[in-house]
Amino acid sequence: PTLESDLRPPSRGGRRRCYHIVTTAALPWMTGTAVNPLLRAAYLNRAAREEERAEFERQKEEQVNNTVAAETLPIIEFPDNDTDALATSSSSELDVNTSRNPSPESDGSRPTPASSSLRFPDFMHRPGAATLVVPWLRSVEDRKRLYGDDRFFNSKEEQEAYIRDWLREMAGMPEEAAKHENGGIGIIFYDAAYYPKFGSIFASCDICSLIPDSTADVCVLEEPEHLNWFTPCAWSSKFSHVVGIIHTNYKAYASAQFHGIISSGFIQMLGTFVVRAHCDKVVNLSGVLPSVAPYKETVCNVHGIRN
């Protein structure tokens, strides 16, 4: 892999990466493009935190071992009146003597071991490594249509709280449900609208503009063709590596319509164009999905199986 495409964890020779998972639906709409990307963000975040915890423990053990080894070094004593011995001593021995022996002003007791003053970084205070980017339906009617009259939400904050509660209680991932600054996943909303004729949600803004440049590293586009039909973004310019995950056979959907003879071919051509333009790597969830970029795609059910 290249430096940009290397997604291996640090324990396997990689580096810490920041992930943005951009999708076309959000809870409480219980569709695959709402649930699976949320779990993907949560598991990427958990994997990064576990890597950091393991690295923390490794560094802690290494520092303790180094300190213990330093404390067992021999202490070189010099006679008070032997100036010749001092003059001929090496600078390294002098450094050891002055650092290990008490000064004349001290009470003669041995200095406090360095291990008692070790300070290790608190990795749990680092922000989470994964951020979920989901649509915010600006229309109250759209929210009621998809989410129901009893939970259509009056603000983004209310919907975010619902998503985190679901992740905590239903998915059993309380650490990932914490606030982003406390190590949980981040959640960013982009303005969107629901189009009944398509049965889908489409963005109504430039999603890339909502993501800080400082964290724009790896991007996972759930349904990249869908995300770029109406409001394409400069994904490959914004992020160092872009992975597109193909969920849906839109050509088959279009073929089932009365205008399918004309529209299906156009839909496939447009989808192929935007996926090739914006994705560095393409993952088809199933072999029955049409190929869009044979030279950089693979077939893999990256959703996995949950108990």
Image: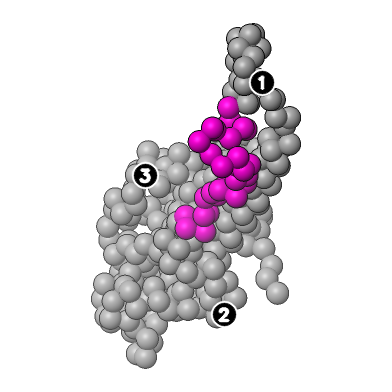
Point out the tag, 1 or 2, that comes first from the N-terminus.
1
Residue 132 vertical placement versus 62 (above, below)? below
Q: Check if residue 118 falls in the magenta segment.
A: yes
Mark 2 vs mark 3, CA separation in Å: 32 Å
- Residue 68 in percent (x, y) is at 70, 41
In the image, the segment drawn in magenta is 98-126
Q: Residues within 10 Å of mark 3 (few under 14, many from 20)?
A: few
Q: Residues within 10 Å of mark 1 (few under 14, many from 20)?
A: few
Q: Quadrant of the C terminus?
A: bottom right
Point out the tag, 2 or 3, that comes first from the N-terminus.
2
Q: Is residue 69 left or right of residue 49?
A: right
Instruction: Check disc 2 and report the residue beneath it.
Output: 170
SS at badge 1: loop
Residue at (64% x, 14% y) in the render: 82
Residue at (40% x, 47% y) in the render: 215
Instruction: Check disc 3 and report the residue beneath it.
Output: 214
Q: How many marks?
A: 3
Amino acid at the residue labelled 2: Met
Q: Is residue 10 left or right of residue 186?
A: right
SS at badge 3: helix
Mark 1 vs mark 3, CA separation in Å: 59 Å
Using the image, tell me which numbered label, if any, was put on residue 274: none
Using the image as rendered, state which of residue 256 and residue 106 is in the foreground: 106
- Residue 159 in percent (x, y) is at 37, 76
Instruction: Check disc 1 and report the residue beneath it.
Output: 79
- Residue 245 in percent (x, y) is at 54, 54
Using the image as rendered, state which of residue 149 and residue 162 is in the foreground: 162
2 vs 3, front mark: 3
Using the image as rendered, state which of residue 67 and residue 287 is in the foreground: 67
Amino acid at the residue labelled 3: Ser
